[in-house]
Image (tube, helix red, strand yellow):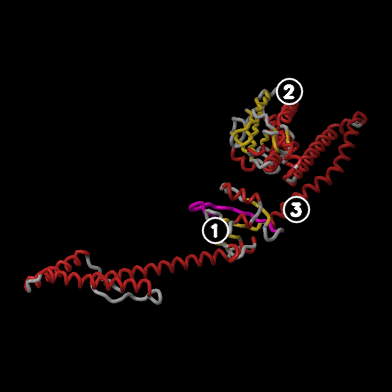
Amino acid sequence: MAIMRREWSHYVRLLLWGLLLCLSLGIAIDEPAWVITAGLSAYVGWTLRQTYRLHRWLYKSPEAGTPPPESKGLWGDLFDGIYETQQHHAKAQKRLQDLVNRIQQSSNALHDGVILVNARGEMEWWNKAASRLLGFHENRDRGQIIYNLVRQPEFKRYFDNKVYEDPIEVFSPEHPNLRIQFHITLFGENERIIQVHDVTRLYQLEQMRKDFVSNVSHEMRTPLTVITGYLETIEDNLDTFPKKWHRSVRTMTAQSQRMESLITDLLLLAKVETSEKAQTNRIAQIKPLLESIQQDAIALSADKGHDITLNIECQSAFLGDENQLRSAFSNLVFNAVKYTQASGRIGLRWWSDAKGVHFRVSDNGPGFDPIHIPRLTERFYRVDAGRQSSVGGTGLGLAIVKHVVINHDGELEIHTAPGQGCEFTCHFPLFRKINDLSLGSKRQSA
């Protein structure tokens, strides 16, 4: 409908001309007041009628899109303007609805789940994959808080912390054999989009790899022990062998010892990876543990003459597995001893603050390029393969450290630069600090 819009001044002029006409007619019959009153009354009556027609059209029309009543002047323009606005709004609404429908259809075609959650944690929408993976039902679960349906405590902590840089993996509440990965993205007013991936296959492959490494390591230990035993016997009687065999026997002995160290680290890593969470809820006395590691590091340093200092600023006990902590902390300290030049400085520090409990190993060794940090805790990853071999490392130490720290709900932070030394810091949550030893004993017995 084409609309001819007139300026507001046009209607003001019409009103003034009407008043002037009434005034002229009233003067002609010598009743100007009555004529003006009658004219204004007629105009008010006509306006009320148009208002009634507008109200009936807006609220009592039998169906949407009904054309407006016919009218003239100002009210005609109003009717037509409102109708045009309704038409534009209906078209925009249809475009938006078509877009929403297409987004929902494309989301339903995905193999991964997508869930839309409001600021209160209530589920507003999800696709078919989310229903399949998590067992959600359209009518029953809409408006439910998501962590009331996904009842794993680690998911609840992940959801509430609002730190979503890394995804989290849990088992599906609907299918216990499915391993599900959640990745949350914040938008708007604390609203969330949750992506759900089925990582069961990857999880099973990882478990197979762990089992394979563990089983092979166990199977290799027995023949290696036999070989090492015979080599030790040969070394004890090496003088009875021709000299050309001496070097070969010593090389075999060194390599068998290196292989034994590798198998020991592989078994330790497998044990740390598969250890239950309950093992980290014991009481660990950190002061004697770190003092023992410091003495071992001094003995390992031998002729290098390292200055190894220990600073314990927090005397409280710690909620954790002491054997795992010894493995992790000693790996960090012994690495510093191996790679720091003679007469170098190595610092061990244990402290706590409002953010948690921390252990740091720092040195003034050669350091390395920070580009290696993201891969440094991978199994067998080496910054410098030649240097690593020369000091007898297995390439598993930092992988063990990473898993121990993860088992204790912490994270490993690494800082280094060429020529500026290295700094490895283990950050643990504050709840693992035990000020009341009697409370810790209760937790341990529980």
Quarter occupied by residue 201: bottom right
What residue sits right under mark 3 in the picture? 208
Apparent side of residue 241 relative to residue 151 in the rendered image (left or right): right
Q: Earlier in the sequence, mark 3 or mark 1?
A: 1
Q: Quick check: marks 3 and 2 in contact, CB under 8 Å?
A: no
- Give the mark, 2 or 1, whose residue is nearer the N terminus: 1
Disc number lying in front (2 or 1): 1
Label 3 to label 1: alpha-carbon separation: 35 Å
Q: Which residue is mark 2?
A: 303
At a point 82% along the width and 38% down the height, the residue shown is 256
Which residue is at a point 81% across and 48% down the rendered structure image? Answer: 215
Please name whichever residue, 263 or 178, is drawn nearer the observer in this view of the structure: 178
- Compared with 299, 264 (above or below) is below
Q: Looking at the picture, how far across and down is residue 371, in whole percent?
A: 59, 40
Residue 327 appears in the picture as rendered: no
The Cα atoms of the two marked residues, 2 and 1, are separated by: 63 Å
In the image, which residues are magenta?
Answer: 177-192
**Which quarter of the image is occupied by the C terminus?**
top right
- SS at circle 1: strand
The type of residue carrying mark 3 is Met
Residue 66: which quarter of the image?
bottom left
Predominant SS of the magenta segment: strand
At 54% from the left and 60% from the top, the residue drawn is 124
User: Would you name the residue on which mark 1 appears?
Assistant: 116
